[in-house]
Image (cartoon, helix red, strand yellow):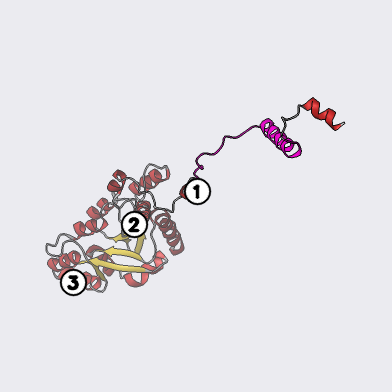
Amino acid sequence: MKIKRQKHAKKIISFYKYNFNFREPFQILLDGTFCQAALKNKIQIKEQMPKYLMGEVQLCTTNCVLKELESLGKELYGAKIILQRFQIRNCAHFKNPVSAAECLQSMLETTNPHHYFIASQDQDLTTAVKKIPGVPLLYIILNTIVLDKPSPRSVSHVQAVQAGELVTPEQQQSICKLKQEQGIARDGAERRGKKRKRKSGNPNPLSCLKKKKKPAGHPPKTTDGEKRKRSRHKRRKTGGGEGPPLQPSESKSAGE
């Protein structure tokens, strides 16, 4: 029977680990009703809780829970002594204490971001806790600690996340962290209105070259035919006398 209970607890813990990112040490918030039931059934909470959950645990409570036990008198003195041995977590009701059920419910907020387990025998508290997704619930039956199966609210939340309809708090935190690293979330609205400044770089070396100036009075370019004629005239002037230049037909006969 003990092995069967541990397998059942292991399956439920795996559900919360995989879907709600629970990690050891498991933080367990206890109230006076749970400690009173453990005292009556002779359950050593500090010893049996880690064995049942198969991992390291941190047992804790709040000042509101302790003050409620003080107001109830000697009947719950034993439960108060047990709770005083555990860690005390700060709540928002330091100056104005509230009931234990209201205080523990406020510690969970709306999404249980600190991954608390709730250990209680209070029916009103357990009913309210089941409406918050991702809150494991512990209670005592006879002389055994029992981890309740995931509530319908937790199951529907997981199904919605898997279908892509919701984003888990862990995913939301990772998205915000990435935005901060990239500088998107910070001054996002201001950066949309501002124009991007161009980086100042070195000028193009080709644009810095000076344009070559053309010399004044440069003669126009001549064709190849004109060049040939000019060279022929020069040769005749050097070879002949002062007479007029010979025609092409005359130059042939003279050569013969």
The circle drawn on residue 206 is 1
Q: Secondary structure at mark 2?
A: loop
Q: What is the quadrant of residue 6 in the picture?
A: bottom left
Image: magenta residue range: 212-241
Q: Which residue is mark 3?
A: 77
Between discs 1 and 3, the one toward the N terminus: 3
Q: Secondary structure at mark 3?
A: helix
Q: Can you give x and y, in whole percent of width and height, for residue 107 in the image?
A: 24, 59
* Residue kind at label 1, given as amino acid type: Leu
Q: Nearer the viewer, residue 245 or 54?
A: 245
Q: How far apart are labels 2 and 3 at the CA level? A: 27 Å
Crowd around label 2: few <14 · some 14–19 · many ≥20 (10 Å): many
Q: Is residue 225 magenta?
A: yes
Question: Which callout, 2 or 3, points to the residue nearer the camera?
Answer: 2
Q: Nearer the viewer, residue 25 or 124?
A: 25
- Give the quadrant of the N terminus: bottom left
- Give the quadrant of the C terminus: top right
On the picture, is 254 further left or further right than 130?
A: right
Q: What is the quadrant of residue 226 in the picture?
A: top right
